[in-house]
Amino acid sequence: MTLAAARIDTGDTAWLLAATALVLLMTPGLALFYGGMVRAKSVLNMLMMSFVSIALVTVVWLVAGYSLAFGDDAFAGLVGGLGQSGMSGLGPGSVHGSVPTLLFAAFQLTFAIVTAALISGAVADRAKFSAWLVFVPVWTLLVYVPVSHWVWGPGGWIVDRLGALDFAGGLPVEITSGASGLALCLVLGPRLGFKRDAMRPHNLPMVILGAGLLWFGWFGFNAGSALGANGLAAAAFLNTLAAGCTGLLGWLVVEQRRDGHPTTLGAASGAVAGLVAITPSCGTVSLLGALVVGLAAGVVCSYAVSWKFRLNYDDSLDVVGVHLVGGVIGTLLIGLFAERAMTGGAEGLFYGGGLVPLGRQLLAVVAVAVYAFGVTYGLGRLLDRVMGFRASEEQEHTGLDLTVHAETAYDHGVLGHGAPVSHSVPAGSAQKVKAQP
């Protein structure tokens, strides 16, 4: 037996293998969640934006992303080096802690995939698919990879120099996707009929199914971040369940008081809001703290999703209201509820840690949000100038499924959006429907 093999813990490895598969499942779950929330004429486009992200991010991650995020620090805590580009030197015998390095790289890859896919919800119904194919890999390298190094990479400035805490991705996943979604909303502008036409979810059972798959996968997301089959993983697992439940209940209470009706969409959105908020804090707060974190997210995010109508930005599927706001809540509340028993040292304000931990969390939130928004806005503007990021008015009116993918999701037409159409467009029909990304 080699020394590397002796260092590999088979229990930890088995759990992380399962957790990696769970997190990968979150992206198809997100596709269903988003797909049910859009109108029927663009559901396939929504599914495709998530699924194609799996392929695009994987290639980028294996070629350079992993090395830049988790390689040895190359410049002032901002980015790693390229010494492991192409997964160079990371054979079966390479070990990260008690698991194979290749498995650790695959686990982190699944985080990068779902983060990129999350952004698509902000620009649903109106983004060019061809522009999305370019945006995803470039965004991954320019935004997700550096922030991951800041928070989790060796020598990253947020973890090593600032001392802020983020157990499973409030900063690299939730806040980057939310801030980036806001930037693209401003670049693309609102959908046709925004604030005038009803844009209701076309399939609420699909939304609930997607939310359930996300919740299932989130156990791998959060408990897997312990990188071992241990007590910390168990605590993160239970905290994840608890916060999802209080997030769901908090959202429904707000809906009942405000609108008089607890809705299916509200239940799904509330659960996701609670899960978003507990992501950074699941390994730092107690069960009581997790209940509070989830409840706070469910209540606040239920109000935050309406901000787009007041501030006139069209966040189609509430990426800003749920992921940015929920991520900020969960990251900041670490500064209040962190417990020594969970962190091994750091404590929040309510447990005797003073205001310094809260200040560190706030600085990390602001830095990541500003960076992600600024870079994404610049990238979006550049792509819009070079190739156009917004679908044409004709494509948006007809629906992206038919005009871009030459398909429809339902055999009997697009549920009230025009005459019935066949499942796919015949080869000679280009004169009738311009199938252009």
Image (cartoon, rainbow, N blue to C red):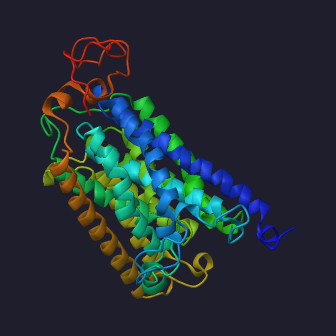
Residue shown at 59% from the left, 53% from the top: 219
Horizontal side, residue 56 vs residue 107: left or right: left
The structure residue drawn at horizontal position 47% and vertical position 45%, both measured from the top left corner, is 55
Q: Residue furthest right?
A: 1
Depicted 24 relative to depicted 13: above or below: above
Q: Where's residue 256, x and y in %?
A: 33, 43
- Point out residue 368 in the picture as x, y percentages from the top left corner: 34, 70
Say whether residue 279 is visible. Answer: no
Judging depth in this view, the residue of 317 and 247 nearest the camera is: 317
Q: What is the quadrant of the N terminus in the image?
A: bottom right
Residue 45 sits in which quadrant? top left
Query: Where is residue 335, by image quadrant?
Result: bottom left
* Residue in the foreground of this view, choosing between 243 and 202: 202
Task: Say whether residue 127 is visible.
Answer: yes
Q: Check the image and report above or below for 394 versus 46.
A: above
Relative depth, front residue between 152 and 248: 152
Please tell me which residue is depicted at 38% across the width and 22% down the height of the picture: 409
Q: Quadrant of the C terminus?
A: top left
Residue 202 place in picture, x, y as percent: 33, 28
Side (left or right) of 166 relative to 432: right
How far across and down, in percent of the image, does residue 72 sit? 53, 78
Report the residue at 58% width, 62% height from top: 87
In this view, 147 is above or below 201: below
Task: Say how many tags the image has.
Answer: 0
